[in-house]
């Protein structure tokens, strides 16, 4: 399985993930929405599928793609300590600015 950060480092894949954020889509839906070629969309969807970021289900003659929450939960968990650190720095900056306003 590929690393989610490595997979999402590719801008075209992030665009596909963004497009799938609000609804499931077929390859042709993604081609229309993103203005990319069908082979390019299919190639990136294969990588996303292999990484577990998306899954596909058959619907008539099409495959419908959707995001899988697991890799994003893992990514969120990994980012959590960094988010906490950043928030501490922002809180300290806010306090410093507030002290500068007092007469």
Image (cartoon, grey):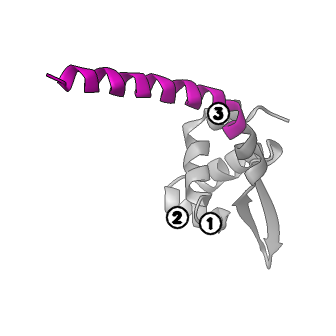
- Residue at the far left in the pictured view: 103
**Residue bearing the label numbered 3:** 80
Q: Earlier in the sequence, mark 3 or mark 2?
A: 2
Label 3: few (<14), some or many (≥20) within 10 Å? few
Label 2: few (<14), some or many (≥20) within 10 Å? few
Label 1, label 3: how many angstroms apart (C-alpha)?
Answer: 36 Å
Label 3, label 2: how many angstroms apart (C-alpha)?
Answer: 35 Å
Contact between marks 2 and 1 (CB within 8 A): the answer is yes
Percent from the top left, x then y, of residue 36?
54, 52
Q: What residue is shown at x 52% (from left), y 64% (from top)? A: 32
- Residue at the far bottom in the pictured view: 60
Look at discs 1 and 3 and give the one toward the viewer: 3
Looking at the rendering, the stretch of residues picked out in magenta corresponds to 75-103
Image position of 34 with respect to 4: above or below: below
Q: Main secondary structure of the magenta part?
A: helix
Q: Left of 96 or right of it: where is 52?
A: right
Percent from the top left, x then y, of residue 10?
60, 35
Look at discs 3 and 2 and give the one toward the viewer: 3
Q: Left of 98 or right of it: where is 68?
A: right
Percent from the top left, x then y, of residue 23?
61, 67
Label 1: few (<14), some or many (≥20) within 10 Å? some
Residue 28 is tagged as 1
Query: Helix, strand or loop at disc 1?
Result: helix
Image position of 85 with respect to 47: above or below: above
**Residue bearing the label numbered 2:** 32
Query: Helix, strand or loop at disc 3?
Result: helix
State the image quarter where residue 6 is shown.
Answer: top right
Q: What residue is shown at x 18% (from left), y 25% (from top)? A: 101
Residue 77 is tagged as none
Label 2, label 1: how many angstroms apart (C-alpha)?
Answer: 6 Å
**Front-most of residues 97 and 58:** 97
């Amino acid at each position: 399985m590929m690393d989610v950060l490595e997979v999402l480092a590719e801008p075209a894949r992030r665009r596909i993930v963004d497009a799938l954020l609000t609804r499931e889509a077929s390859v042709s839906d993604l081609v229309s929405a993103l203005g990319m070629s069908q082979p390019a969309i299919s190639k990136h969807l294969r990588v996303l599928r292999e990484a577990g970021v998306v899954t596909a289900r058959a619907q008539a003659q099409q495959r419908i793609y959707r995001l899988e929450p697991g890799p994003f939960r893992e990514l969120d968990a990994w980012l959590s300590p960094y988010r906490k650190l950043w928030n501490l720095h922002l809180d300290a900056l806010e306090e410093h600015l507030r002290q500068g306003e007092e007469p």
